[in-house]
Image (tube, helix red, strand yellow):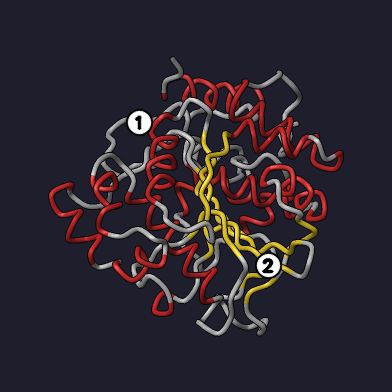
Amino acid sequence: MVTKRHYEQLQSRWRQEVLRLPAGPPTHPTSRLPTVEYCLPREFHGSTPVEGGWNFVSGAAHDYALGRSAGFNVFDDRLWRNMLSSQPLAFNIAGGLREHLASAADAFAELTEWPVIGFDRLGESVTDRHALDGLHAEWAPPRSRHTGDGSSFDIAAPLRLGGHRRVFLSIEVKYTDDFSSGVAARDLATKLEQYRPHLDALGIGDARREPLLRGRTFQFLRSVMLTDSVVRRGLRGDDRLDGGLATVVAPAADAVAREAVATVSAALGTTRTQVAFWSLDDLLDGCADQAPLQVWADTMRRRYLTGPVVVENSRSGA
């Protein structure tokens, strides 16, 4: 059985053997430990995690995080120093794929089994902070035009398909963190009632809700409702896409994430917006089939899944 301790040890090895860095203080404010093996130092030999990009597997991902983190829902310590956090994993994925968008589109065609021919755009103005041009990490549409609850996507992308069709892809990224309900179980039925229009749009009537009241599905369900709202309404209610796919990317052994996807999938009464679980292996395998993404996918696999090969220190960790 793969445990959180396994991934803690993988990240500790990457820090020691690839980055050649000492352990840093914890990023969790309530921890009293002086250092944590999967956290990076605040400073080392005159450099900082922000300057050195230590938590990223490529210069492209580091540069993307630098540009994207200003003004968005990005928590600095978790992004720059916590090696177990799903947030730097999401930026490593988005940053790596954005460097080769044509190959990323081909990888998504393989993963979704849809005729993906490229990326699209939501929103017209380049000054619109909610516009989504291609694939991005940490994105949300205007809150008041959709579910109104402050939900955002770890990664999101409008995709162009053959036949002039457009679909919306959302990705929730998990590494060692579990899905949380975000609300006490006794209050979940009342909470779901607040989303009735969105549940009805998904074909999740009262008879289909009972399984959603058990287990840890609410966080993913919110993502599915927001995905479907973007499909139905576009950015601000003035557009419509042809379909959507809400996915979870997590290690293959993440039974909680698999169960959340399966439970929501069984409750859906529409095929307009679908759901899927992709293991991190699945994602990296699909990307490795594209030559420009092979080195990145191999580095990601060694960082997050198999452990590092001892190499000379570099920002890329290759």
Q: What type is the residue that disc 1 sits on?
A: Pro
Which labelled disc corresponds to residue 85?
Answer: none
Is 82 located above or below residue 116 in the figure? above
Residue 188 rendering spot, x and y as whole percentages: 20, 53
Q: How many marks?
A: 2
Residue at point 34% right, 45% down?
Answer: 217
Which one is closest to the eye, mark 2 or mark 1?
Answer: 2
Which residue is at the far left? 186
Residue at point 40% right, 50% down?
Answer: 220
Residue 42 rendering spot, x and y as whole percentages: 49, 42
Is 299 located above or below residue 121 in the figure? above
Residue 282 rendering spot, x and y as whole percentages: 64, 33
Which residue is at the far top? 1
Q: CA–CA distance between discs 2 and 1?
A: 50 Å
Q: Nearer the viewer, residue 270 or 10?
A: 270
Q: Nearer the viewer, residue 103 or 201?
A: 201
| The C terminus lies in quadrant | top right
Secondary element type, mark 2: strand
Q: Nearer the viewer, residue 269 or 12?
A: 269
Which residue matches tag 1? Answer: 34
| The N terminus lies in quadrant | top left
Number of other residues with Cα within 10 Å of mark 1, as a class: few under 14, some 14 to 19, many 20 or more: few
Which labelled disc corresponds to residue 166?
Answer: 2
Q: Nearer the viewer, residue 196 or 298?
A: 196
Q: What type is the residue that disc 2 sits on?
A: Arg
Position of 137 compared to 255: left or right? right
Residue 74 rendering spot, x and y as whole percentages: 48, 58
Residue at point 68% right, 67% down?
Answer: 166
- Among numbered discs 2 and 1, the one appearing first in the sequence: 1
